Amino acid sequence: MRLALPGVLLTLLLLAGCGLKTSAGIPPEVESVINSVTDDIAQERYDIVYGEASELWKKDTSLEQSTQVLKTLHAKLGKVESRALNSATEQQNSGGALQGHAFIITYQTKYERGEAMETFTVIEENGQWKLARYLVNSTALK
C-alpha cells in the first residue's frame, strides 16, 4: 500500500499539469480575438489590427509604429504554422494599466521561419474583448 500512494500522487500531479495546457479556461471570445489578430497579421492587414485594438494599444503606439512593428515581425518570422498553449492567466484589476478584466495568454509558436514565445494581452473594453498588448520573443527577430 505504501508504494501505491506515491504512484497515485504522481498520476494526479501529472493530470493536474496536463490540465494547465488546455484552453478550456479561455473564453471563446478571447480566442476569437487572438485568431483574428493572427489572421490579420498573416494577411498583412495591420490597419485592422490597430483599428480593432484596445484604447490601451492606441495610447501606447501610433498606427504607423504599430504597422512597422507588425510588418517587421511578419517579414522575419512569416505566418504562424502551429501554436501550443503555454499559460493562460485571467486577471481582474482595480487599478493600473490593465484595469478591469484581462487575459494574458502565452503560446509556444512555430512560424514559417522560426520559433517564438508569443504573448497576447486581451482586455474587456465596453463589453468587448480587445487586444491590449502583443509580444513576440524570438532569436529569429535579431
Image: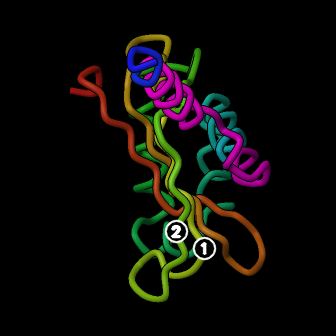
Q: Residues within 10 Å of mark 2 (few under 14, many from 20)?
A: some
Q: Picture coordinates of residue 104 (x, y %)? A: 50, 54
Above/below status of 123 relative to 65: below
Count of labels in the image = 2
Residue under numbered circle 2: 91
Query: Magenta span has 8?
Result: yes
Q: Nearer the viewer, residue 11 or 78?
A: 11
Q: Picture coordinates of residue 89 (x, y %)? A: 50, 55
Q: Is mark 1 in CB contact (under 8 Å) with mark 2? A: yes
Left of 65 or right of it: where is 125?
right
Left of 132 or right of it: where is 2?
left
The magenta segment is: 7-33
Q: Picture coordinates of residue 38 (x, y %)? A: 63, 36
Residue under numbered circle 1: 101
Left of 126 or right of it: where is 93?
left
Q: Which picture quadrant has residue 124?
A: bottom right
Amino acid, disc 2: Gln
Above/below status of 116 relative to 131: above
Identity of the residue furthest to the bottom in this view: 94
